[in-house]
Amino acid sequence: MTTRTPLLKAEHVGIQFGGLKALSDVNMELNKGELVGLIGPNGAGKTTFFNLLTGVYEPTEGSIVLDNEKLNGLPPYKITRKGISRTFQNIRLFGELSVLDNVKVAYHSLARHSILSSIFRLPSHFSGEKEIEEKAVEFLKIFKLEHVMDEKAKNLPYGQQRRLEIARALAAHPKLLLLDEPAAGMNPQETKELMSLIAFIREKFDLTILLIEHDMSLVMGICERIYVLDHGQLIAHGTPEEVRNNPKVIEAYLGEEVS
Amino acid sequence: MATLKRTIGFWISIVLALILFVVVQVLISGEILNSFYVNTLFFMVINIILAVSLHLIIGITGQFSIGHAGFFAVGAYASAIMTMKLQMPFALALLVGGVAAAVAGLLIGIPSLRLKGDYLAIATLGFGEIVRISLLNIEYVGGASGMTVTHLTTWPWVFACLLITIIVIANFTNSTHGRACISIREDEIAADSMGINTTYYKVVAFVIGSFFAGIAGGLYAHHFYIIQPTNFGFLKSFDILIFVVLGGLGSMSGAVIAAILLTIVSTFLQDYPETRMIIYSIILILVMLYRPKGLLGTKEVTSFFKLRRAVQGGIGNDNKNTVA
């Protein structure tokens, strides 16, 4: 088992859109270095929960704490700088930008040169840009994307776009990485590659990963613990084995087929 | 290496620009160009400055603002007040015009840049109209009859302002700050989740764009002897918008080329007052039909030169900037 310091602590988190309670009383604890799955039927509130963690929405109840810092009410860009970064269910790359520039954007918050130094092309501009460029190129090498780095992101094949999105999220130096259905639309071979990629980045970057996924082989295969959401509420959590055999989960999610 | 090449490219452009400057200056002082052509030329350069400044807001940052004539007006009147009422030198007046427009941009930008798309367009359109109607009713600046301004704009001033505008906006765009702006245009939610303070960069782009619109206003005011609120109506805003869209959203050289072409077209169409707007509109429709992404799309003129090199040498080191 990994070290027992909770990295993320979500307590009684909920959000209400008008009369609709999209999520209520969600408790989650993620320890450093864990790989945790979040599953549930369509419309259960998984992506909404990601949006709460990343500040796209502000929770109407409960608190979210990362490394002893409260995140409630912070704008998304500040939360990213505190160490949560994510990918999206429907890929959201900067299509018109090159692959390299996509990663460079993620390094933006590390840039120390000011707007004025860029406008007047002061030495700090050149050193700052060079630093960003070197880091970004190095990063693309890790993800084996350096041969397409001048390509526009929108022109990449689907699998590479997914890989680039993960690379971009990691370039923002997160402590916690949120992956929203990374295997969506992938064939079994690509899913397999994705699984090894996830295992690899987790080792390499000393990451904690929370992942939403519908692909059961992926979730059951690599996650250490699994949380199950249904109708905006946590109905179960535990090891893949426990979750698989939980009658509530079978009823809500896996249906009659698993027997 | 890449930096070196880029620096060389930069100095070549500067040298070319200086040659252009000297040639035109000789033509003007030798009175080879008559005043009609000089007028057109100045008007063209002012249009280019407006187009490039709006390009930063719409083409790069993706914020659909159609009140640019409002900032143009603020700059024109502010600089005219400086020279005519306060007897300040022209250089200071230009600067004050730019700063006044930038302040207006800041005041309008902070509340309205939270709006998106059509809603932002309507808010900025409203701002442009407010400026026009206010000027119409302020006696201090002459109300509807306008304000007479001495002729101070000369070719060196016009040219220097143009050069500064292009360099500043190109430098801004080709930096991590410019990339932040482009990422907002491409996908605001993703930009946010990459740690980019989207509101901040939208306001910054808006303020820089307004500043140069204000400079253009100062040049305009001191060239045409008189400024009236009717010169700054929403039709002017649309003119500027058309330069940017026609040139290709996201392409600065496209905006420049479109501003040049359309100024020429509309100047020569002045001989046919009855059909002028019809022909002008038909040209716009035809361009949009055959070049739906604008004259240059998102490309820059320089990218046509770089293309060949990238093919020869595989993945080039010097072709990583998307714009300018």
Image (spheres, grey):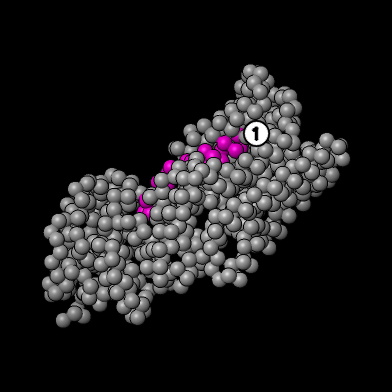
Can residue B201 be seen from the camera position used here?
Answer: no
Q: Position of residue A184 (x, y in %)?
A: 35, 71
Identity of the amino acid at label 1? Answer: Gly
Vertical placement of residue B104 versus A259, above or below: above
Image quarter of residue A31: bottom left
Horizontal side, residue B27 vs residue A224: left or right: right
Horizontal side, residue B77 vs residue A81: left or right: right
* Label 1 chain ID: B
Residue at x 30% of width, y 45% of height: A74
Residue A128 versus residue B281: which sits nearer the camera? A128
Horizontal side, residue A180 vs residue B37: left or right: left
Q: Position of residue A151 (x, y in %)?
A: 51, 67
Asked if the magenta segment contains residue B203, the reply would be yes
Residue underneath mark 1: B217
> What SS does tag 1 mark?
helix
Can residue B14 be seen from the camera position used here?
Answer: yes
